[in-house]
Image (cartoon, rainbow, N blue to C red):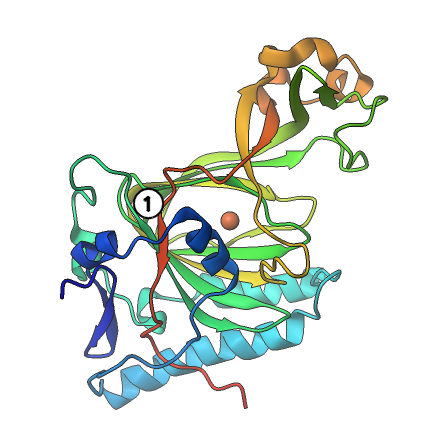
Amino acid sequence: MEVAAAATAGAGVVELQLDLLEAAAPTEREAKRRRVHPVPAGPPAGAAAPGRRSCSRRRRAVQRLFQACRHVFRGPGTVPSPGEVQLLRHMLDRMRPEDVGLSPDLSFFRARDATRGGGTPTITHTTIYKCPNFSMVILFLPRNAVIPLHNHPGMTVFSKLLLGSMHVKSYDWLNTADPDPSSATSTTSSSSSDGPCLRLAELVVDDVFTAPCDTSVLYPTAGGNMHRFTAMAPCAILDVLGPPYSIEEDRDCTYYAELPYAHHSLVAAGEDVERGQGQGHLAWLEEIDMPRELKMCSVHYGGPPISDE
Ligand SMILES: [Fe+2]
């Protein structure tokens, strides 16, 4: 049987096999649900015993990160303090690919082209740990893969690019005190019976990041809560989300289409826009269904295990 997605372990590292990823691509709905119901974490099946010193270093790094997360994330409706953010950021800044069982020598990261037959590259994710207060996941993006513009409702998210290079574009709502885009008095939203429901957002990040680089942090209403990743080279991104996505707790992922500010500028004549940092930093975002071309699948975490005892 040709398996399409697998994480196998050799000398304690996760080996992603792109050939295997394609055939296991789930349906869109399955993919979306899997994002909030990932497979449980666990040690790699059949992992060879690595050197004692390197294994210990790796285990300590991810274990320390886990313990810090357990201390920092206190559940829905809470945001880590500035000091706690600094703590996690510092720990993540020092994380290396080997700390979660990865290496730039893996075939996944040396691949020049992830697509076969011109299809959209499949994005893979693996969950290191998940509880009601936070989750630790790794995203694997083949070259040219795109995670479309999406939000992180009520969440604080730390993203550490471990390997690769990606373009990041992120937005925050221009007026966070105006949560209802259908409000008739709003100057930063637009809604009518014959048009789409749009809301004005401000550009936060539009840049290329190449590992090794510092950790980025987004907050419920700041730091670029809505973002899009485009892989310039095969990427591995370690994400810490607090709290995690949850359909049951109304924290599902929402996707957006982006329209230039000028596309709908007549609606936005209010002071907020006039005082904005320039129209080039503004865009209208329209809520959309999960893009059909987005293909995601999950694999078992095969890096150093953590203990929650
Ligand atoms: Fe995200």
Position of 262 with respect to 93 (left or right) is: right
Q: How many marks on residues?
A: 1
Say which residue appears at 36% left-offset and 42% top-offset. 166
Say which residue appears at 27% left-offset and 90% top-offset. 52
Q: Secondary structure at mark 1?
A: strand
> Is residue 24 or residue 206 the one in the foreground?
24
Residue closest to the far right: 185
In which quadrant is the N terminus drawn?
Answer: bottom left
> Is residue 286 or residue 101 the one in the foreground?
286
The amino acid at mark 1 is: Ser
Q: Is residue 140 visible?
A: no
Q: Tell me residue 89's x, y (percent).
A: 55, 61
Q: Decide: is 96 above or below 173.
A: below
> Is residue 43 or residue 106 the one in the foreground?
43
Q: Tell me residue 218's x, y (percent).
A: 60, 49
In which quadrant is the C terminus drawn?
Answer: bottom right
Q: Tell me residue 289's x, y (percent).
A: 52, 37
Q: Residue 171: which quarter of the image?
A: top right
Mark 1 sits near ligand 1, with its Cβ under 8 Å away: no
Say which residue appears at 50% left-offset and 65% top-offset. 37
Q: Residue 173: which quarter of the image?
A: top right
> Is residue 100 or residue 123 the one in the foreground?
123
Position of 8 with respect to 289 (left or right) is: left
Q: Tell me residue 206's x, y (percent).
A: 48, 33
Residue closest to the far left: 1
Q: Decide: is 53 above or below 215.
A: below
Say which residue appears at 35% left-offset and 86% top-offset. 56
Read off the residue under disc 1: 165
